[in-house]
Amino acid sequence: QVQLVESGGGLVQPGGSLRLSCAASGRRFSIYTMRWYRQVSEKQRELVAGITSGGSTNYADSVKGRFTISRDNAKNTVYLQMNNLKPEDTAVYYCNSEFTSAAGRLAYWGQGTQVTVSS
């Protein structure tokens, strides 16, 4: 069982920056692929960025060049650095961990943190 706790959300003006953190409990954090998703109201949850156990990253087109995902395996933490924020980045941001093997798939979600971009 893995528990994920997000932090770092808040209110920021357009053009500003925030850094989200997601702290994971349990061992073997390094084997999980970690992702950030976001969701606006009842809309479908959208993948924002991901980082594999090997450090490969991917981003949604809408955040490329503005957001950076990183991980610190020693601290069991994944980060999302968000720069040049836009009003359309307003959403609840969720952390996700996933590990898939021949034995099956393990996936966990955090409770979410609100990011509001507004003047």
Image (cartoon, rainbow, N blue to C red):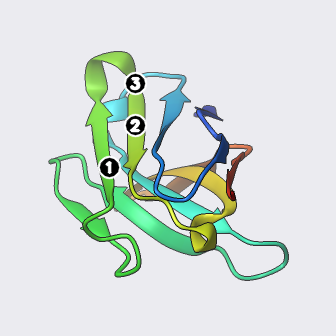
Residue 18 x, y percent position in the rendering? 49, 41
Query: Pointers 3 and 2 in contact (CB under 8 A)?
Result: no
Locate residue 81, reporting x and y percent: 38, 44
Callout 1 touching callout 3 (CB < 8 Å) = no
In the rendered image, which quarter is residue 10 located in?
A: top right
Which residue carries the number 2 mark?
A: 78
Expressed as whole percent of the image width and height from the top left, the position of residue 62 reads 41, 79
Return the residue nearer the eye: 43 or 105.
Answer: 43
Looking at the figure, which quarter contains the N terminus? Answer: top right
Q: CA distance from mark 1 to mark 2?
A: 7 Å
Determine the residue positioned at 42% across, 57% down.
103
Residue ID for mark 1:
69
The furthest residue to the right: 42
- Say what amino acid the circle numbered 1 marks: Ile
Q: Quadrant of residue 116?
A: bottom right
Quadrant, the C terminus:
bottom right
Q: Which residue is mark 3?
A: 76
Query: Is residue 105 in sight in this rendering?
Result: no
Residue shown at the point (32%, 49%) measured from the top left: 69
Under circle 2, the secondary element is: strand
Report how far apart the C-alphas of labels 3 and 2 lie in the structure.
7 Å
Left or right for 14, reference 100 = right
First in residue order: circle 1 vs circle 2: 1
Q: Nearer the viewer, mark 1 or mark 3?
A: 1
Position of residue 74 relative to residue 85, above or below, is above
Q: Nearer the viewer, residue 45 or 84?
A: 84
Name the residue type under label 3. Asn
Q: Is residue 112 left or right of residue 15?
A: right
**In whole angstroms, how far apart are the C-alphas of marks 1 and 3?**
14 Å
Q: Give neighbour class at mark 3: few <14, some 14-19, many 20+ (Cα, 10 Å).
A: some
Neighbour tally class for label 2: few under 14, some 14-19, many 20 plus, Cα within 10 Å: many
Residue 13 is at least partly visible in this image? yes
